Image (spheres, rainbow, N blue to C red):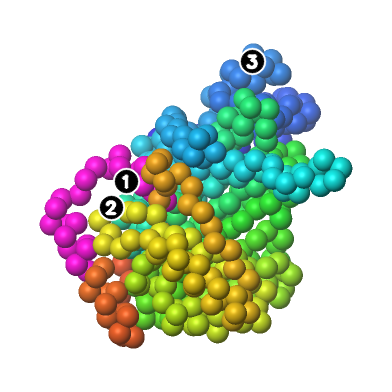
């Protein structure tokens, strides 16, 4: 893997300092950023607004694109594009570009709901959290992504949109990885996304998700950003969430909800709670009532998402009628809720599924052990027993690092 810095992820002032050292005028920085962000250059040679000598020096000093290759799979009659990105060291990460056509018309002819183009991006290669219903969790943790590797996923999506004379309207950090375990790089990416000289997208068009890294949520609260915080909750009862989101063994659900509640109060921004619906596991009336009790009175909204089928997991999505009943019970409990439609089911929709497919089929004994473990843990959880299993070594190290001050002992 090239150790040259990624051009799109340079910290503030770094490009200007490089130009000064090269004896170039300061206005070249704007020209370079225009080429990288407005024209989505894939190589130094694509920066045609620069002299050839500067293009050559840029190519020697930076990676204009940190993504080596893309494999794009289209689904939903063109409305969903799932991309597998190959990075310089062979790591694979995924992004999903989702198109939402304009809907409804006002009397003056303007749309009630404007056309939107949302890209869902990854912050890590693999994931240490290990949620058993998630294909990324089965892959395990690879490494944190660099700022440029996060941003170049966005640039690749913007490049494809430009071919259709369209532009990105929303960015969500809900792809592979736990964003708050790579928070410094994620915040650098958010700054670039909202910078008027780069992508120029308002903070309210950005969503950052977490499975419940409480120190990261507390840090965000101190910063009071205006992007939306999304919490991948999936259960409101600790015994069950211990199984579905192993990080719950470190930061229990009440602590996670309390930190998110403080975020909402400080920022004035409604927190989104993501809840994957798994048949017979977390979709009971008891679960709905526990969720309503947890969030009642909060500035919060729940998104119910039928589980995408994942290989080697013994569970299935809740049937539509069960999802509707669950949603209605939440509404009666005073909770704002939306039922989300699955996207890209014919394109490996589950997070990490394309990368998992490329990783190959695990050995049959490993698959059997995984299924048996999931069933044993979930059956105990449904009886109300908390998990006594420790966090995996990698996740424990990441959790410890998340509790340290910024930049101290960061897991890379």
Magenta-colored span = 351-373
| Left or right side of 94 for 369 | left
Neighbours of disc 3 within 10 Å: few (<14), some (14-19), many (20+):
few
Q: Can residue 253 be seen here?
A: no
| Residue visible at 13% across and 57% down in the picture | 365
At mark 1, the secondary structure is helix
The 10 Å Cα crowd at callout 2, few under 14, some 14 to 19, many 20 or more, is: some
73 sits to left or right of 158: left
Q: Is residue 8 above or below residue 409?
A: above
**Which mark's residue is nearer the viewer, 3 or 2?**
2
The C terminus: image quadrant: bottom left
**Quarter of the figure with residue 359:** top left
- Choose the circle earlier in sequence order: 3 or 1: 3
Give the residue at mark 3: 53
Between circles 1 and 2, the one closer to the viewer is 2
Res 157 visible: yes
Q: Is 223 above or below relative to 72?
A: below
Q: Residue furthest right?
A: 108
Q: SS class of the residue under badge 3?
A: helix
- Answer whether residue 149 is magenta in the image: no
Query: Foreground: 40 or 205?
Result: 205
* Residue 239: image location, x then y, percent: 36, 81
The answer to whether mark 3 and mark 2 are in CB contact below 8 A is no
Position of residue 129 in the picture relative to residue 57 (left or right): left
Q: Which residue is mark 2?
A: 311
Rendered view: 257 above or below 361: below
Q: Residue at x 81, y 47 (%)?
A: 106
Cα distance in 3D space between marks 1 and 2: 9 Å
Q: Residues within 10 Å of mark 1 (few under 14, many from 20)?
A: many
* Residues tagged 1 and 2 counted as in contact (Cβ below 8 A): yes
Name the disc covering residue 356, or none.
1
């Amino acid at each position: 893997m090239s150790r040259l810095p990624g051009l799109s992820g340079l910290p503030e002032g770094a490009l200007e300092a490089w130009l000064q050292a090269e004896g170039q005028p300061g206005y070249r920085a704007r020209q370079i950023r225009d080429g990288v962000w407005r024209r989505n250059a894939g190589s130094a040679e694509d920066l045609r607004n620069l002299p050839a000598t500067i293009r050559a020096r840029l190519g020697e000093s930076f990676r204009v694109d940190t993504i080596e290759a893309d494999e794009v799979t289209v689904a939903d009659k063109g409305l969903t594009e799932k991309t597998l990105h190959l990075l310089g060291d062979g790591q694979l990460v995924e992004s999903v570009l989702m198109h939402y056509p304009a809907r409804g018309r006002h009397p003056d002819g303007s749309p009630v709901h404007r056309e939107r183009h949302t890209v869902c991006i990854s912050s890590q290669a693999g994931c240490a959290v290990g949620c058993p219903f998630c294909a990324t969790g089965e892959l395990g943790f690879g490494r944190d992504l660099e700022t440029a590797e996060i941003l170049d996923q966005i640039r690749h999506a913007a490049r494809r949109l430009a071919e259709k004379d369209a532009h990105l309207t929303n960015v969500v950090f809900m792809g592979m990885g736990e964003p708050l375990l790579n928070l410094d790089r994620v915040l650098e990416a958010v700054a670039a996304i909202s910078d008027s000289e780069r992508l120029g997208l308002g903070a309210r068009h950005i969503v950052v998700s977490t499975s419940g890294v409480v120190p990261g949520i507390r840090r965000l609260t101190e910063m009071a950003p205006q992007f939306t915080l999304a919490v991948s909750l999936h259960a409101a009862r600790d015994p069950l969430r211990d199984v579905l989101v192993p990080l719950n063994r470190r930061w229990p659900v009440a602590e996670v909800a309390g930190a998110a509640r403080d975020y909402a109060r400080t920022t004035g921004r409604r927190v989104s709670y993501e809840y994957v619906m798994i048949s017979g596991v977390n979709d009971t009336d008891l679960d709905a009532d526990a969720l309503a009790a947890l969030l009642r009175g909060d500035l919060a909204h729940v998104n119910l998402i039928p589980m995408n089928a994942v290989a080697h997991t013994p569970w299935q999505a809740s049937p539509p009628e069960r999802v509707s009943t669950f949603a209605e019970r939440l509404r009666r409990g005073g909770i704002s809720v939306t039922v989300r439609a699955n996207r890209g089911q014919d394109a490996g929709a589950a997070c990490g599924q394309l990368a998992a497919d490329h990783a190959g089929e695990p050995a049959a004994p490993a698959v059997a052990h995984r299924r048996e473990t999931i069933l044993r843990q979930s059956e105990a959880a449904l009886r109300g027993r908390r998990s006594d299993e420790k966090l995996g070594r990698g996740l424990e190290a990441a959790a410890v690092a998340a509790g340290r001050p910024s930049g101290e002992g960061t897991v890379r």
